[in-house]
Image (tube, grey):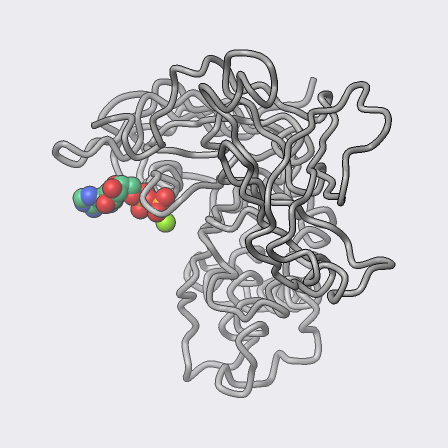
Amino acid sequence: MTATAISLRGLAKHFGQVRAVDDLDLDIADGEFFSMLGPSGSGKTTVLRLVAGFEEPTAGTIVLGDEDVTRKPPFARDVNTVFQDYAIFPHMSVLENVEYGLRVKKVGRAERRQRAEEALATVRLAEYGGRRPHQLSGGQRQRVALARALVNRPKVLLLDEPLGALDLKLRREMQIELKEIQREVGITFVFVTHDQEEALTMSDRVAVFNEGRIEQLATPVELYEQPTSSFVAEFVGTSNLFRGEDARRLVGEDGTFAVRPEKVRLAGQAPADTTGLCVAHGVVREVVYLGATTSSVVDLDDGPTVTVSHPNTDTSIDAAVERRDQRVVVTWRRDHLVSLGPSTQETSPEEETA
Ligand code: ADP
Ligand code: MG
């Protein structure tokens, strides 16, 4: 059993009527890359600010390692935070920026220099110590911000949407690098994002937040393959959801069911052997070319709409486009259906608290 880096019990933060964080229990292991994923306003930043000590909880406790820090000020907590709007001093060199925190802590000059150079090497900026911040790209500046936090050698690093300002290509590169850096330094990372791809790419485990609570806590594979609620099924990737009458007709059972678009097949006619398959008929309404894949939207005869995703391995876009407005058969394996509980739960995430 690995040691626990962060332990939250009954943690709550209310702002007037708003329950930003609502009775949260959570354990994050030492050395884990842990992500908090959720839509805007779901309470992710507030959790980080509570852990860092920038907010006082309405209720509950925060334990770091084996120390209860609930009532301790930020500087007495062995954590560092990296924000999206990283504060880099423009008048200092990159190396001076990284050294700054150690200077404040009165660490001696030689050690300061050595640790700052180490931190810069860790973020792949060993050659950039002499530069000024304005001579760096956005991605490089974000690395300086990371080095500034790593140089303190905290037990836990809190990262609040640190890649949010970068363009997609750079963000994807940084995702892979961040994960590598985390593995190298062995520090616990708590990473906040609203981007499901980002959370799936980097994390050992992901907590999906909804209205100040955790909807599901799981590994990326489990989250994608076995979502436990329609909120998670729709927020992490895309899902076709069947409820009520649709579920009875298409699945043959009461309940709420999800099937991923890439598990659905589309053909001109039904296969000869339909053992273990769900089969439905409809008309292709839209065909969307997405480069690596093509998505087809099919209006089923008695509703609902089903999205089918196919890899463009051997097919051309033309073949898919020819199907527009055509009658088709869609099939999926019954064992690819995920059961999401009773059908009575037909409220969307926003309506639940109304
Ligand atoms: P996220 O980071 O997931 O977008 P936040 O933690 O920032 O969510 O916010 C959660 C909820 O708490 C939101 O409804 C937000 O408006 C509210 N909130 C956050 N900080 C404050 C504050 N200082 N005062 C009042 N309400 C706040
Ligand atoms: Mg936030």
Seen in the picture, residue 240 relative to 339 is either above or below; the reply is: below
Left/right of residue 16 with respect to residue 192 in the rendered view:
left
Residue nearer the viewer, 162 or 109: 162
Q: Residue at x 71, y 26 (%)?
A: 336
Measured from the top left, where is residue 118 in percent x and y?
A: 68, 63
Say if 334 sits above or below 53 in the image.
Answer: above
Residue 144's quadrant in the figure? Answer: bottom right
Question: In the visual, does 180 lie left or right of 192?
Answer: right
Q: In the image, is residue 98 above or below residue 183? A: below
The quarter holding residue 226 reads top right
Q: Which residue is drawn at 74% across and 26% down?
A: 333
Quarter of image, ligand 1: top left
Of the pair 31 and 234, the residue shown nearer to us: 234
**Where residue 80 sits in the image (x, y, percent)?**
47, 49
Percent across and percent down for residue 251 are 61, 19
Taking the spot 42% from the left edge, 24% from the top edge, the residue there is 8
Taking depth in this image into account, of 137 and 226 the one nearest to the observer is: 226
Q: Say which quadrant the N terminus sits in.
A: top right
Residue shown at 12% from the left, 34% from the top: 16
**Where is the C terminus found, in terms of image quarters?**
top left
In the foreground, 81 or 263: 263
Q: Horizontal placement of 262 versus 137: left or right?
A: right
Residue 54 appears anywhere in the view: no
